[in-house]
Amino acid sequence: MPRLPPTLLRQATTINPLLPPLLRQTRDLNAAKNELRWMKEYAIERVQKRVSRENNKHVGISSVRFRNRTLGWRTLLEKMVKERERGVPLQYLLGTEYFGELELEVRRGVLIPRCVPRAKKDKKDITSLILF
């Protein structure tokens, strides 16, 4: 795999210091930005859900348990970026993958579904290809 240009890495760092590790996986600045945005939204949502469960009266962004430690959303985001840098699929980190019109829950060890190109040619409903 070709090396990333240093100018691209510097540009990514000026935008956000968490982008270069993602850029090494995605190889594209726009894709890295999207992944970072999705991970940030997920981290904030996780923290909000955790706080609202613990305290029904106050919903704020403070912390969430991650591998037996309490973390804020920024720390959780940094941990997710490090895992992504190690090659963990984004879908495993976010816990979902879209397949046609379906949003599927995925976890480590689950085969991540991909769209079938033939189904697009035949203009079939992709969801009809799933066997139950």
Image (tube, helix red, strand yellow):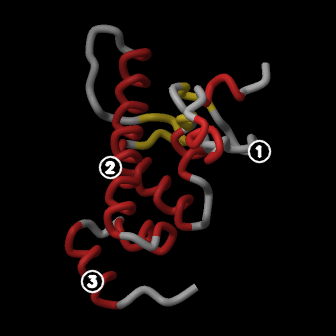
Given the image, on which type of amino acid does mark 1 rest? Gly
Residue under circle 2?
37
Looking at the picture, does residue 102 appear above or below residue 33?
above
Q: Residue 66 placed where, x, y %?
A: 54, 41
Residue behind mark 1:
109
Q: Which of 19/132 is in front?
A: 132
From the viewer's perspective, tell me whether residue 59 is left or right of residue 51: left
Question: Contact (CB < 8 A) between labels 2 and 3?
Answer: no
- Badge 2: residue crowd in 10 Å (few <14, some 14–19, many ≥20): few
Label 1 close to label 2 by CB (< 8 Å): no
Give the residue type at disc 3: Arg
Q: Residue 10 carries which label?
A: 3
Residue at image x 43%, y 24%? 50
Is residue 51 shown above or below 72? above
Is disc 1 placed on a helix, strand or loop? loop
Marks 1 and 3, the one that precedes in the sequence: 3
Q: Residue at x 34, y 49 (%)?
A: 74
Estimate the spatial distance between the alpha carbons at disc 1 and disc 3, rounded to whole Å.
35 Å
Mark 3 nearby-residue class (10 Å; few <14, some 14–19, many ≥20): some
Q: What residue type is labelled 2?
A: Arg
Mark nearer the N terminus (1 vs 2): 2
Residue 40 drawn at (x, y percent)? 35, 46
Q: Distance between the residues labelled 2 and 3?
A: 19 Å
Horizontally, is 34 left or right of 120 in the view? left
Q: Which residue is drawn at 41% across and 47% down?
A: 39
| Sequence-wise first label, 2 or 3 | 3
Q: Where is residue 114 in the image (x, y as percent from the top left)?
A: 63, 45
